[in-house]
């Protein structure tokens, strides 16, 4: 019996290792072409982001792109004026050349725009009172290198900022704690120049929500809890929002360790 047991054991172990190797897909370079669905013409400067590997690239003048990927990864493809598209990477995309991905142009109905200029009198004392003001105030706290926006100036603004800093458990535990793995992608996103360039040109939060697997309301909640003003949250580009979330998350981790 002993003579049969050892070969059988080695056979089972060897088979197990071979199965494990087969299941682990290797990250390869995926090549494809992005084209206009209406004209079949190649599209240049289209942003392609691998949501799983957290890397990005853009298409060349022939509409071609190369990006690290493996089977079942998801590519997020965006171009201004076209509908964003998510594409799942399949085996045939590696085995056969000439994979083409088509983007559909968005149709916008332009409405009448009425421009209302400020009514200026020419008297500085009067005109200054009529111009809109940014009511977002920043408060600096001794010992911290950054300031905090606390919204409108009111008696509770400073208390709100201090409360957020002195109570880290109440600040972001429920928000960051729910998505710890997704928050780790923040550093990868900030290190990829192509993703940064894409986010700097966007204001719709779509790419951020796809990369971080958060809803827009979650992003707003994070920034509200970090005391960013409503005007910043609504007007900042996606890269500024990413940097704000990243900064807020790093502060949260530091404060959380000191509990």
Image (tube, rainbow, N blue to C red):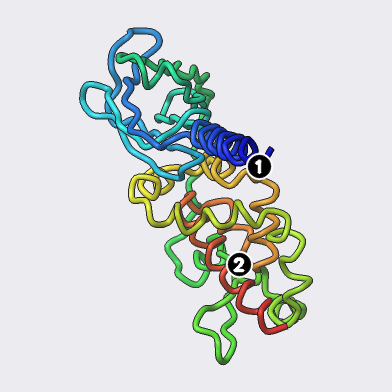
**Can you give x and y, in whole percent of width and height, for residue 220 in the image?**
66, 53
Q: In which quarter of the view is residue 257 placed?
A: bottom right
Q: Nearer the viewer, residue 163 or 181?
A: 181
Q: Residue at image x 50%, y 31%?
A: 22
Relative height, residue 192 to residue 257 (above, below) = above
Q: Residue at x 74, y 66 (%)?
A: 173
Q: How many marks?
A: 2
Q: Nearer the viewer, mark 1 or mark 2?
A: 1
- Judging by the rendered image, the residue that carries numbered circle 1 is 2
Of all residues shown, which one is farthest toward the bottom?
142
- Eyeballing the image, is 196 above or below 14? below
Judge whether 188 appears above or below 107 on screen. below
Image quarter of residue 174: bottom right
Q: Residue 127, percent across and down?
A: 50, 64
User: Which quadrant: the N terminus?
Assistant: top right
Residue that badge 2 annotates = 135
| Comes first in the chain, label 1 or label 2 | 1
**Residue 186, how many percent across, how many down?**
51, 56
């Amino acid at each position: 019996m002993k003579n049969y047991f050892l070969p059988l054991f080695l056979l089972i172990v060897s088979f197990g290792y071979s199965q494990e190797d087969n299941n682990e897909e290797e990250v390869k370079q995926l090549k494809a072409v992005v084209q206009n669905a209406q004209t079949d013409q190649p599209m240049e400067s289209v942003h392609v982001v691998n949501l799983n590997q957290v890397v990005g690239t853009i298409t060349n003048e022939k509409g071609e792109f190369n990006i690290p990927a493996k089977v079942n990864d998801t590519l997020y493809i965006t171009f201004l004026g076209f509908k964003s598209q998510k594409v799942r990477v399949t085996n045939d995309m590696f085995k056969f050349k000439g994979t083409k991905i088509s983007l559909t142009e968005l149709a916008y109905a332009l409405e009448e725009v009425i421009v209302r200029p400020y009514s200026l009198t020419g008297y500085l004392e009067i005109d200054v009172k009529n111009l809109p003001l940014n009511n977002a105030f920043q408060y600096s706290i001794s010992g911290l290198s950054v300031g905090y926006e606390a919204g409108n100036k009111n008696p509770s603004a400073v208390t709100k900022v201090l409360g957020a800093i002195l109570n880290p458990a109440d600040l972001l535990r429920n928000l960051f704690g729910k998505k710890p793995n997704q928050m780790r992608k923040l550093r990868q996103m900030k290190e990829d120049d192509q993703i940064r360039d894409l986010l700097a040109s966007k204001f719709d939060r779509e790419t951020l929500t796809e990369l971080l697997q958060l809803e827009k309301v979650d992003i707003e909640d994070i920034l509200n809890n970090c005391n960013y003003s409503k005007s910043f949250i609504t007007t900042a580009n996606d890269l500024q929002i990413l940097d704000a979330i990243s900064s807020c998350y790093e502060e949260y981790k530091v404060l959380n360790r000191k509990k």
